[in-house]
Each structure stands twice: as C-alpha cells, then as structure tokens.
C-alpha cells in the first residue's frame, strides 16, 4: 500500500467521513448535503496528497456485468442470427446467480459467419467477452482467437467432441461438426 | 412477495409539468395544494345490502356494501361481534386492475380501512352478541372500486363509515331450544364513532392533499391518517418508497386533522 | 375470557420488568448463511428473525425489471411454529401488507440506480414472533443488505412505541401489543433524518403522537449504534489482518 494513504477507521454505511470542502469523495462513498458518507462496510482511507476519501469494502462486492469482462457460459438456445448464453463465470469468479447474454451472428468471428448454426449448438460451453452492458440481455463477442467454443457436444449422440486435425469429431458416432472454436478448446481457461 | 412496481409510462411526462406547477402552488387539475376534490355521498344505493354507500371523490368512485350475517366469534374475543373488511379492485375501474386474487395494494387498502373502523371502536362490537361465546353478528364491509382516479383510501374510508352509519342490524330471537331465529325486525347498527381518513402525498418535497391518480403515480410517498370524532389519531399508514422527515409528519398530521374535521362538519354533522 | 392483568405495576415497571422507556434485549449477527449473498439474524426480545439477501441478480421474470434501477423484492414470512397457535404457512393478509411496507421502508436507502434491470431479493423469515416483529425485521434486513455489500445510504432501524394503560411504552412486547391501546411502528434512517415506515393502530392524541414519534426516534438511535457495532465486530478480524499487512509493507 502507498505510504501516502492512511488507514483511517472501519466504517459502516452512513458513517460520516468528511465534508466536500475538505475532501474529494472516492469509491464507496456518497455525498449528501455537502457531507461525505460511507456506503459500504469497510475501511475508510484518506489519500493525503489528493485529499480523496475512499472506502475499501470488506464485504462481498456485488457483481455486475461490465464491458470487457471475459465470461464462461453455456449456449442455451440458437437461432439463425443470434444465440442465447447463460453466463455462470465472470473473470474466473463463479456467479451465484447466472445471467443471460446474447451473441449476434456478426460478433461470432472476425470472418463472415452466415448463420449461428454453423458456430454454436445448444449445450456448448463457450468463452466470450462482454461488449455491451447498456442494454439487456448483455451482448457478447467471440471474435478473437482465444474466444469461442471450449466444449462442444455432438448433436447426434450428445458425446463430448474432440479436436482431431482441426476438425471436431465425435469419438462415439464419428460425425464431424462445425464450430467457432477457441484456441483453448478442450482445455480450461 | 412484494416487488417494486412498474412505473406508468405517461407519469414521467406528466410529472415534469406537475412539479413545475407545484412550485408555484398549483396543481394539474387547478386545485391548490391543500384542496380536496368534491365529495359526494349517496347512501343506501343497494337495497339488498344491510347498508351501502356510493362515494365519489372527483372522478374516483367507490361503492361499499355492508352485509351482516351470523357466525362464530373469534376465539380470543368470545363476547364481541366480528368485522371483516375486504377490498375488490374491480377490473372495470381501471386498466391497471386485473381480475384475480387480491394483490398487495387491495389488501393494504382493506387493512387501512379496517384499522380505522376497528381501532376507533366505531362499531359497538359488544352489542353484536346473539349467544355469548357461540353466535355473534359478523359485519362484512366490502369495498368495491368502480373508478380509480387516486386516493382510494379516503374514498373507501368515507364510504365504509357512511355505509355502516346507515346499516340496519337484523334482530335475532333465541328460542327455547337455545337456537337463534331471524325475525323480520331490524335495529340500526350501533355506531359510536366516525373515523375519517385523510391522505397526503409527497411530491418533490411538496405536500398535497387528496392526490389524484396522476399525482399518486408521481408521488414518492403517501401518508394516511385516520381521525376519530374527538380528534384522536386511530390509524396511520405511510406507503410508497419515499420518506418523510419528523417535522413533515407532524405538519402533515395538523393538515390532515383540520381536513378530517372539515369533512366531518360537511357530511357527518351529528359526529362533531 | 382474557384475564385482566396489570401491565404496569405501582413502581412503573412493565410485565417483563422493564421501565417505560426501556428496550428489550437485542442481539444481532451478520453473515451466518453461506448460500445467501448477505444475511443477518436478530433477537429482539422474543423475536427471532433471520434475513437473507440475494442479488443484485438478473430480474426473473424479465418483465418486472426496470430500465433505470434495480427492483427490490421482499417477502416477510412467519414460520408455522413462530406463534402460540400454529400459523398456516400460506401468506396471510397481514404478511402481504408487511412485505409491502418493509420493502418500502428499505428501498430509500438502497442505491438501486447502480444496478439497472436487476433484482435484489430480501427474504425475511420470522422464526419466533413477539411484538414489533416488522421493526426487528427491518433492522435485520438493512444489516443483511450491508452484509451483501450492496451500497447503502444508511442503515434503517425499526422500533415501535405503544400505549398501555394510558402511558406511552417503548418497544411493546406481544402481550402489551395485544392488550394495549395503541401500537406505532416506525422505521428511521438516522443520517437522512427520515422516516421510511410509519404505521399506527390504536388511539393517540396529538401530544401523544408527537411524543411517541420522538421516543421511537431516540430508541432507533440506540439500536442504530448496536447495528453498527455488529457490522464492525464481524469485520474486526479483517481489520487486524489489514493492519498487519500494512505494517509488513511499511
């Protein structure tokens, strides 16, 4: 921790931290009638140089999807132009309550994809990135080398497909299918 | 389970003008901040009910019917009659209202009206006993919303007490075998008090009396206070996600008390 | 027949030996349920209430969500064994009303605008009920919300004032509530100085009403201090760790 910062005190929501004439409100604080209050349980820190008061939360930090986060999800439903994905892991954190996101056909790959059916099938595990958080459902992209399908399941027999010479092949029935696969296919991310 | 309600889409558009007007002390319908809409009370509109009243408060229309039947008393109050208040948001009253079991708003409304009547001791419950511990009169107050234009609580409360005031109580005779028989006679329902509810709404730090539906949609919170004939408070309910300061509550109480007295003076002369 | 009982004795003490302006013993705990995002437990007199908070999470069903803020869902429920006689587990009209007023009491402090289109669930289970259970439920719910890390303007405190034998009594218990003449629960937001829940049934004169409001407010400040202490105690261990890690780096 920076020496300029000073650990002040443990605070709970509603604790008065200072006035705006003296300090600048930072994360974990809010201003009401010119007074800075804490809005989370944690530690109030004062940066002596910038005169900024911040509260370092000590509770769980509520998760909210945001642009740029890398997510792990399962494809739920596929249409011609989009697929719905249930996201259950964000930036490596497992979510207690999964949320729904959508991926449009134009964001599947850097190359032209005619239909989502050529890239995903329901049940696939995909690795994707959030590109839109202003509207719900959140929008995802897989247009990068590391993004795409991590686990694909055979649409014939449901078996986990394996990568065989850049082709997805079912070890049970031998059928070959198309997917937008990630470079980490079959591995953990 | 209670959930944050959806906002009426038109409310936001109307609220801008409403708030602008309010700062100059006016309201959308031309009233002053502390003006009540016109109250009309028609008693005895339903002949088959033991008592009834149709109250209009501006465009808000509420019909209350009172039915009195016999039943067993509450186990903890064997020597008292029983009172049941129920509110029905009839689908014809507004497009918000859907048929189905009562939602939290209709339950809340019924319970506020119930509290006003019960806690003020308006009905002399002790005189409703036919066979002590076994058979008592049960008073059913059913609130029927016919047109919803805001302030249902006041309209319902006034309608309920009006209907009770003109209710007749069937006379029962207990025969030799100890069973109650209904006679053709009727007595007036014994009423001891006249509770009047008055509702205020808080819109952008302004307090308005008798909110219309548009105002209710914009208001952050409402406060209903019910007053007895000697000016005591017998029921309070704050509803809505807004807040009041202590000072506002005390001020609101004064305004509401004055208004309740005025309503009593105009419509319930014998209860001053 | 209800036995006639004196609720206030000659020395001015109540049935449970309290003075007129004395609170029942209160004990609180936070973060006791592993599955919930936030949880709290309160013992307020004989009230035993457990609260769990889930969220913010995706609104389910979709159509209940709001585009500019999170919606708050609240369920106040009493366990069948919480009362003297078994209570049917189906929600009663009283529980439906209390769910609504408790939600409305808590919403003003939550920064719902930070989580548009999502939902915050507050589940209140009354394991044992005594007088003033909705107030204790509000006190515990705001702790659970803070425990869930949801940004709050302040904690909300609930407390009731009753009237027994013509005298105002703070924090009425079950029997005082049943046999008393009035009961007025309020919820107070100390920092904002605002009242977010106000209900009353019974009979109050104007002076009594104003006095009762001030009594409840004072009592709320006492409970508020307890709430803060509970939260700080829970994270005291963490405080030590932080201090240690700081001294290591310096």
Image: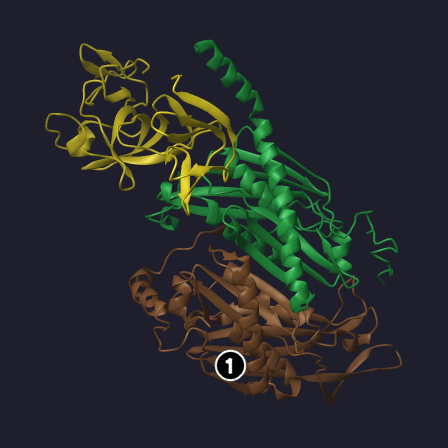
Chain colours: A yellow, B brown, C green
Q: Nearer the viewer, residue C68 or A22?
A: A22
Res B69 quadrant in image: bottom right
Vertical placement of residue A33 versus B42, above or below: above
* Residue B39 x %, y %: 49, 83
Which residue matches tag 1? B55
Q: From the viewer's perspective, is B24 left or right of A148?
A: right
Question: What residue appears at the point 56 percent right and 38 percent down from the top-left corner?
Answer: C143
Q: From the viewer's perspective, is B185 left or right of B239?
A: right
Question: What residue appears at the point 63 percent right and 75 percent down from the top-left corner?
Answer: B195
Tag 1 subunit: B
Question: What residue appears at the point 88 percent right and 78 percent down from the top-left corner?
Answer: B177
Q: Nearer the viewer, residue C101 or C207?
A: C207
Q: Nearer the viewer, residue B56 or B233?
A: B233
Vertical placement of residue C123 versus B27, above or below: above
Vertical placement of residue B92 versus B243, above or below: below
Residue B107 appears in view: no
Q: Secondary structure at mark 1?
A: strand
* Residue A18 x %, y %: 44, 37
* Residue C9 x %, y %: 87, 55
Question: What residue appears at the point 76 percent right and 52 percent down from the top-left corner?
Answer: C20
Res C124 quadrant in image: top right
Question: Looking at the rendering, in which quadrant would you find the C terminus of chain B?
Answer: bottom right
* Residue B239 x %, y %: 51, 60
**How many residues crowd around disc 1 within 10 Å: few (fewer than 14), some, or many (20 or more)?**
many
Name, please, the residue furthest toward the bottom.
B185
Q: From the viewer's perspective, is B73 left or right of B176?
A: left
Count of marks, rendered view: 1
Residue C37 appears in view: yes
Q: Nearer the viewer, residue C85 or A28?
A: A28
Vertical placement of residue C89 versus A126, above or below: below
Name, please, the residue furthest toward the left.
A112
Name, please, the residue furthest toward the front.
A22
């Amino acid at each position: 921790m920076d020496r300029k910062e000073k650990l002040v005190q443990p605070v709970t929501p509603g604790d008065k931290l200072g006035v705006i004439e003296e300090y600048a409100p930072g994360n974990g604080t809010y201003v009401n009638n010119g007074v800075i209050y804490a809005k989370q349980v944690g530690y109030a820190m004062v940066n002596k140089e910038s005169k900024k008061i911040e509260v370092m939360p000590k509770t769980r930090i509520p998760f909210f999807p945001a642009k740029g986060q890398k997510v792990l999800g399962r494809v739920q439903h596929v249409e011609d132009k989009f697929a719905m994905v249930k996201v259950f892991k964000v930036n490596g954190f497992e979510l207690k309550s999964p949320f729904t996101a959508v991926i449009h056909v134009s964001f599947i790959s850097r190359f032209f994809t005619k239909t989502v059916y050529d890239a995903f099938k329901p049940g696939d595990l995909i690795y994707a990135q959030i590109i839109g958080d202003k509207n719900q459902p959140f929008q995802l992209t897989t247009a990068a080398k590391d993004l795409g399908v991590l686990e694909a399941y055979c649409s014939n027999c449901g078996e986990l497909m394996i990568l065989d010479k850049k082709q997805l092949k079912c070890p049970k029935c031998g059928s070959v299918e198309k997917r937008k696969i990630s470079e980490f296919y079959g591995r953990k991310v | 389970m209670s959930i944050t309600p959806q906002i009426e889409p038109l409310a936001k558009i109307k609220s801008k003008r409403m708030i602008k007007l309010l700062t100059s002390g006016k309201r959308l319908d031309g009233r002053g901040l502390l003006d009540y809409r016109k109250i009309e009370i028609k008693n005895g509109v339903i002949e088959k009910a033991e008592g009834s009243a149709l109250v209009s408060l501006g465009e808000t229309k509420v019909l209350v019917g009172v039915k009195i039947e016999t039943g067993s008393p509450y186990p903890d109050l064997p020597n008292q009659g029983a009172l049941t208040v129920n509110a029905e948001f009839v689908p014809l009253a507004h497009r918000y209202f859907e048929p189905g079991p009562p939602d939290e708003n209709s339950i809340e409304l019924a319970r506020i009206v119930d509290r006003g009547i019960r806690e003020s001791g308006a009905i002399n419950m002790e005189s409703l006993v036919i066979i002590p511990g076994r058979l008592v009169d049960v008073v059913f107050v059913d609130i029927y919303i016919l047109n919803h234009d805001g302030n249902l609580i006041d309209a319902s409360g006034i309608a309920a007490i009006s209907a009770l005031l003109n209710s007749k109580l069937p006379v029962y005779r207990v025969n030799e075998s100890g069973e109650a028989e209904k006679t053709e006679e009727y007595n007036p329902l014994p009423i001891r008090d006249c509770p009047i509810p008055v509702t205020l709404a808080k819109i952008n730090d302004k307090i308005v009396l008798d909110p219309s539906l548009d105002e209710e949609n914009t208001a952050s919170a409402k406060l209903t206070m019910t007053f007895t004939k000697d000016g005591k408070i017998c029921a309070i309910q704050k509803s809505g996600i807004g807040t009041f300061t202590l000072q506002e509550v005390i001020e609101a109480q004064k305004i509401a008390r004055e208004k309740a007295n005025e309503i009593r003076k105009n419509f319930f002369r014998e209860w001053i | 027949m209800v036995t006639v009982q004196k609720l206030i004795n000659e020395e001015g003490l109540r049935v449970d030996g309290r003075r007129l302006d004395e609170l029942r013993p209160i004990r609180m705990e936070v973060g006791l349920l592993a599955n919930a995002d936030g949880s709290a437990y309160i013992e307020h007199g004989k009230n035993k209430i457990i609260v769990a908070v889930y969220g913010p999470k995706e609104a389910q069903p979709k159509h209940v969500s709001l585009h500019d803020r999170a919606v708050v869902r609240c369920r106040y429920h009493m366990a069948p064994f919480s009362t003297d006689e078994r209570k049917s587990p189906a929600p009663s009209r009283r529980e439906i009303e209390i769910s609504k007023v408790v939600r409305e009491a808590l919403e003003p402090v939550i920064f719902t605008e930070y989580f548009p289109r999502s939902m915050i669930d507050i589940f209140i289970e009354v394991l044992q009920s005594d007088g003033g259970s909705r107030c204790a439920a509000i006190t515990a719910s705001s702790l659970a919300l803070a425990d869930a890390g949801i940004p709050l303007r302040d904690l909300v405190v609930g407390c009731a004032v009753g009237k027994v034998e013509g005298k105002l009594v703070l924090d009425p218990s079950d029997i005082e509530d049943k046999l008393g003449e009035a009961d007025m629960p309020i919820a107070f937001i100390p920092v904002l100085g605002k009242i977010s829940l106000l209900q009353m049934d019974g009979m109050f004169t104007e002076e009594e009403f104003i006095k009762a409001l001030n009594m409840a407010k004072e009592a709320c400040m006492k409970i508020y201090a307890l709430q803060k202490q509970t939260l700080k105690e829970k994270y005291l261990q963490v405080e030590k760790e932080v201090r240690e890690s700081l001294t290591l780096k310096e």
